[in-house]
């Protein structure tokens, strides 16, 4: 992904009288929650109030799913078999059981997307009532796309990409898979490498659709430094921000 620090004309900082909506996304171990806390403190130093919400997983995930979701479990099996990283393997002629599982997976993805839309609407309303300048979700639609990995152009993919467009900025945190695994302590490097590919692919598709998506390497930079750059990006026209834009 080439380095590009100039945002498009769609970008409007807070100082333009606009309430910014930001999602911090990325695989497990990337440092999302840490960055969100640092960003909240940094914005508070600027006298700005941040409204925080969680933007990943539906009520079903929180009750019956593994922490990394259905796609994560399949990714782990695929990596263990040594499959080429990419779309989850599918047989040419699916069995009835596979058809049922795909249907359930699609329904699950739509439940996720609708719940995220509801959460974001409520966060915007709360921010309006409390005069919060920034709305931030820990995770967001990019996480849902990586989790469910719908076929590009499918109804579910379009639904999630529409959700991406409701954000002013998507921040994708990344790091080498070995480092992610050490930080996370729950998933192996092979599984996390699979997730990294899925995140980057959907980030590129989201950026190609005209959305603002920035990729940040958390292995090379401390969370305080990243929070400083994001705070500047949110409060003034961006010049020389040390981030990488997803390819568009």
Image (spheres, helix red, strand yellow):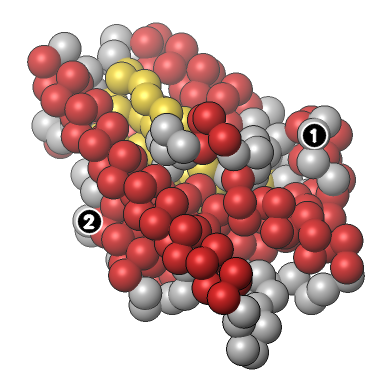
Q: Residue drawn 66% across and 70% down? A: 88
Q: Position of residue 165 (x, y in %)?
A: 27, 55
Q: Compared to 237, does 92 lie above or below?
A: below
Residue 155 appears left or right of 205: left
Residues marked 1 and 2 touching at CB (< 8 Å): no
Which of the image's four quarters has the C terminus? bottom left
**Residue pointed to by mark 2:** 10
The quarter of the picture where residue 155 lies is bottom left
Q: Position of residue 103 (x, y in %)?
A: 45, 65
Task: Name the residue nearer the viewer: 32 or 20.
Answer: 32
Q: Helix, strand or loop at disc 1? A: loop
Residue 143 appears left or right of 15: right
Indicate which label's residue lies in the foreground, 1 or 2.
Answer: 1
Q: Tag 1: Cα neighbours inside 10 Å, few (<14), some, or many (≥20)?
A: few
Residue 46 appears left or right of 130: right
Q: Residue drawn 49% across and 59% down? A: 105
Asked if residue 173 can be seen in this view, the reply is: no
Q: Position of residue 18 (x, y in %)?
A: 15, 35
Task: Name the residue nearer the viewer: 131 or 152.
Answer: 152
Q: CA distance from mark 1 to mark 2?
A: 39 Å
N-terminal-most mark, 1 or 2: 2
The quarter of the picture where residue 137 lies is top left
Task: Name the residue nearer the viewer: 146 or 212.
Answer: 146
Q: Helix, strand or loop at disc 2? A: loop
**Residue pointed to by mark 1:** 186
């Amino acid at each position: 992904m080439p380095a590009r620090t100039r945002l498009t004309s769609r970008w409007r900082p807070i100082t333009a009288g606009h309430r910014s909506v930001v999602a911090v996304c990325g695989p497990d171990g990337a440092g999302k929650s840490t960055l969100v806390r640092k960003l909240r403190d940094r914005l508070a130093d600027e006298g700005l109030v941040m409204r925080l919400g969680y933007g990943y997983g539906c009520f079903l995930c929180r009750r019956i799913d593994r922490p990394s979701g259905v796609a994560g479990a399949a990714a782990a099996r695929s990596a263990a078999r040594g499959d080429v990283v990419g779309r989850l393997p599918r047989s040419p002629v699916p069995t009835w059981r596979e058809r049922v599982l795909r249907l359930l997976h699609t329904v699950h993805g739509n439940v996720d997307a609708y719940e995220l839309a509801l959460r974001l609407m409520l966060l915007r309303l709360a921010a309006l009532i409390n005069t919060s300048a920034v709305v931030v979700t820990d995770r967001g639609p990019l996480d849902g796309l990586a989790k469910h990995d719908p076929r590009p152009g499918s109804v579910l993919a379009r639904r999630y990409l529409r959700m991406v467009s409701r954000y002013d900025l998507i921040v994708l945190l990344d790091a080498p898979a070995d480092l992610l695994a050490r930080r996370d302590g729950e998933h192996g490097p092979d599984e996390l490498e699979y997730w990294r590919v899925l995140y980057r692919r959907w980030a590129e598709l989201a950026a190609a659709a005209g959305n603002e998506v920035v990729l940040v390497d958390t292995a090379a930079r401390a969370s305080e430094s990243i929070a400083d750059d994001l705070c500047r990006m949110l409060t003034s026209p961006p010049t020389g921000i040390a981030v990488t834009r997803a390819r568009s």
